[in-house]
Amino acid sequence: MRKDYNLEKRKYVIGGFIIIIAVIYLVRLFSLQVADDKYKDYADSNAFLRKAIYPSRGIIYDRNGEVVVYNQPAYDIMMIPREIHDFDTIDFCETIGLSREQFDKRMRDVRDKHLNPGYSSYSPQTFMTHLNSEDYGKLQEKMYRFPGFYIQKRILREYQRPVAANVLGNIREVSNADIQRDPYYKRGDYTGDLGVEKSYEEYLRGVKGEEILIRDARGRIKGHYEDGAMDKRAISGRNLKLSLDIKLQEYAESLMVNKIGAIVAIEPSSGEVLAMVTAPSYDPSLLVGRKRGENYAKLNQDPYKPLLDRSIMGAYPPGSTFKPSQGLILLQEGIINLSTPYPCYHGYINGRLKVGCHGHGSPIPLKPALQTSCNAFFCWGFKNMIDRRSKYGTPAKAFEVWKNYLVELGYGYRLGLDVPGEIRGFIPNAKFYDKVYGENRWSANTIISVSIGQGEVLATPLQIANLCSTIANRGWYITPHVVKEIEDTVLPAKSLERHNPSIDRIHFEAVAEGMRMAVTGGTCRIANLPDIEVCGKTGTAQNPHGRDHSVFMGFAPYHDPKIAICVFVENAGFGATFGVPIGSLVMEKYLTGQIAENRKYLEQRMLESNTIIYSGVKKH
């Protein structure tokens, strides 16, 4: 009989079709039983209710053990969408203070997978956060009327004093980006935002626990699954001890009321930040609770920028506080010695170029130049270094040597403070000027203003305070940090790193002596304290946008330094007018615990002064 090839082909087609259908069924079964959690969630939600247990967030103390930030109870309204049945929506809204429109929007947002990634109608979802105690009490009595809803206990931050908002930071509800970045977080969770709350989030947050509760056929809770054997307890966050002296912080902030600027005080021997003030500031409790968003928007729109931490984000010309670093470089490079005099004819005059200076003796060497803050001395020293071709070859190569010393002293790059937001300031390099003026077409006179902390040089108050700390230590510094201890663990090594600039100690001794002379008989005389040897350096930083900035850096005591400080007051005129008085008061308060009677007038004047009126910013 003749073979039917069409029938033979049909057999393979039918077989292939059966195999394809089988594969489709297998893939679908795998998807339903393994890959897709929908039906598992459905089954689990019928039998179990999984409730997250939120840990207590770590408490924050100051260096003396005073509580700075602690926790208070807060309540969130949670819901399991598939368990919500008909209920009196108006009664629910009136109980918790929502309008019907707000209720409907919240329900839509919860179900929107773009706003709420990982949404499942079978698992708990956050409906509303930050329920106050009064609304919680009213809702708790009526919970039986609202099927599918329950209350979850959480914590909010409470502040002992309305200060240090820039250092402490705050907590906020997590964003989608937070959830995608870290699987620890779910919608409605909180995370640190700004300050140590952000940089030490993983220590402070702790570990969430979980309760597994059994339901009956009607969804009623019947107790813990396996008598709680499968529950996981929450692990509290670690407590932090800050390096801040919170009373000193509060005092320093009071001196900066009605002013724009910053104060940074450091303990030189440890790198611990004693106070870090930005002005204007704000009460950190404004960013807690249901009005957080509204208050944040107001602060963000404030023309005085209270959310800008000027202590680490403000890039300013350092002015004459830069001169001690110039003295160190000139001594180390052998451009000058302690007897080298430079003339000052009411300023630096070289050809048609003149940089003005106030009246004082002339010529003078380094220490009297620091004492009187002579511009001409440091301009001549800078010129004799940058233009010394016999030693460096070209101005560009000399300038790179100059710049590298400044980097070693902490300028031009982030110092590594353990609070987010620090900027690097700016120290130009030779390529920068090659680009501006052309290669080999510039010299010291072209950029002479950088020698006195003007021109392109920019620094943060933290960097200026760190330079002062380095001089106080006679040639080294520890990375500045605001956290002193973490409970049951050690600080990261980078917070305790020691830095040793390649400048000889003997030169730091000379510069420190010049700064002491500035207090005993120079531009910082108002900082002189009867029983404490203070060293200081004023700065009057030119401001192209208005009145000059008032700057001061200093340390005390001279031979056993406990505090190094930088004060920067915008639009406040001479360094001796505001920078020196405020800096000396903060040092006195820290070292003695009080202000001497004969200096109370100075304290009162600083407390009552208003320099914000000179800023040119109008508040609407």
Image: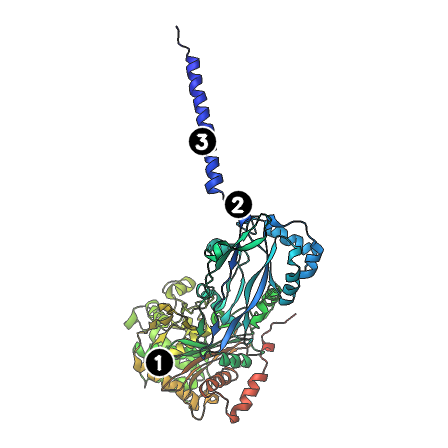
Q: Which sits earlier in the primary sequence, circle 2 or circle 3?
A: 3
Viewer-proximal residue among 320 and 613:
613
Cα–Cα gap, marks 1 and 3? 76 Å
Q: Are marks 1 and 2 in contact (CB under 8 Å)?
A: no
Residue under numbered circle 1: 473
Viewer-proximal residue among 285 and 70:
70
Viewer-proximal residue among 216 and 411:
216
Identify the residue shown where x is 43% and y is 88%.
519
545 up-or-down from 6: above or below: below
Q: Residues within 10 Å of mark 1 (few under 14, many from 20)?
A: many
Residue type (three-letter) at the residue carrying disc 2: Ala
Residue 593 is labelled as none
Q: Residue 398: x, y in percent?
A: 33, 70
18 up-or-down from 562: above or below: above
Residue under numbered circle 3: 23
Residue type (three-letter) at the residue carrying disc 3: Val
Residue type (three-letter) at the residue carrying disc 1: Asn
Please state which of the two labelled residues, at mark 1 or mark 3, is closer to the viewer. Answer: 3
The single residue placed furthest to the top in the displayed view is 1
Q: Residues within 10 Å of mark 2 (few under 14, many from 20)?
A: few
Q: Secondary structure at mark 2?
A: helix
Residue 43 is labelled as 2
